[in-house]
């Protein structure tokens, strides 16, 4: 069994990681006898959330940067190494993406500090496509008003 671990790689009070100094994405092979030592497989900045696509040999991640952010897509090699796919780096359109959810036709990327959810299309071969839409949550509704504060989406799910 293999695990992939994303980590904050640069210190940032803004993201709540004043001691961030990770290596990007690290692979660890696990076994009953302890497995192998961790190894760096993608030296990216602040890949704070990673997902391995079910039934596929791809790993997706976001880079949680104070300004901007990216959706990343990697092919997974048989030895666990990662290779960025062609077109596998897409700007998410808001600051500090913190979560991603995969759908068959699009990817949702939540931005807590950026106060938005990005909808990024997928190409016919399943790779990331273009930024299709940036969703801002409502500021008010019947009986409530949050217009004095930004919404802070932390997670979105695809059903």
Image (cartoon, helix red, strand yellow):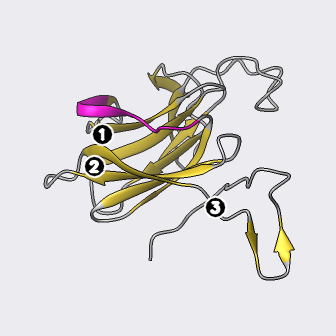
Q: Is residue 11 visible?
A: yes
Task: For label 2, count other residues whose C-alpha is less than 10 Å away and answer few (under 14), some (14-19) or many (20+).
Answer: some
How far apart, in angstroms, are the residues tagged by discs 1 and 3?
Answer: 35 Å
Total number of numbered discs in the rendering? 3
| Residue 62 position within the rendered picture, expressed as x and y whole percent measured from the top left | 50, 38
Label disc, if present, on residue 36 of the rendered structure: none
User: Does the segment drawn in magenta span residue 106?
Assistant: no
Q: Which residue is mark 3?
A: 137
Q: Which residue is mark 2?
A: 57
| Residue 20 position within the rendered picture, expressed as x and y whole percent measured from the top left | 74, 21
| Residue 136 position within the rendered picture, expressed as x and y whole percent measured from the top left | 59, 56
| Residue for point 41% across, 44% down | 60
| The C terminus: image quadrant | bottom left
Pair 2/3: label in front: 3
| Residue for point 85% across, 81% down | 143
Mark 2 or mark 3: whose residue is earlier in sequence: 2
| Residue for point 75% across, 17% down | 11
Q: Tell me the magenta residue range.
A: 83-94
102 left or right of 88 in image: right
Q: Which residue is mark 1?
A: 76
Circle 1 sits in a helix, a strand or a loop, which is it?
Answer: strand
Mark 1 or mark 3: whose residue is earlier in sequence: 1
């Amino acid at each position: 069994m293999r695990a992939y671990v994303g980590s904050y790689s640069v210190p940032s009070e803004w993201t709540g990681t004043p001691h961030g100094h990770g290596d990007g994405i690290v692979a660890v092979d696990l076994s009953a006898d302890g497995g192998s030592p961790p190894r760096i497989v993608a030296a990216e900045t602040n890949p704070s959330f990673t997902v391995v696509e079910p039934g596929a040999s791809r790993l997706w991640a976001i880079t949680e940067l104070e300004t901007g952010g990216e959706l990343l897509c990697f092919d997974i090699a048989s030895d666990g190494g990662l290779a960025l796919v062609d077109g596998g780096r897409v700007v998410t359109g808001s600051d500090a993406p913190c979560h991603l959810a995969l759908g068959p036709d699009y990817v949702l990327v939540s931005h807590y500090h950026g106060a938005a959810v990005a909808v990024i299309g997928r190409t016919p071969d399943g790779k990331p496509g273009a930024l299709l839409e940036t969703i801002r949550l409502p500021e008010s509704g019947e009986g409530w008003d949050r217009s004095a504060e930004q919404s802070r989406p932390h997670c979105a799910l695809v059903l």
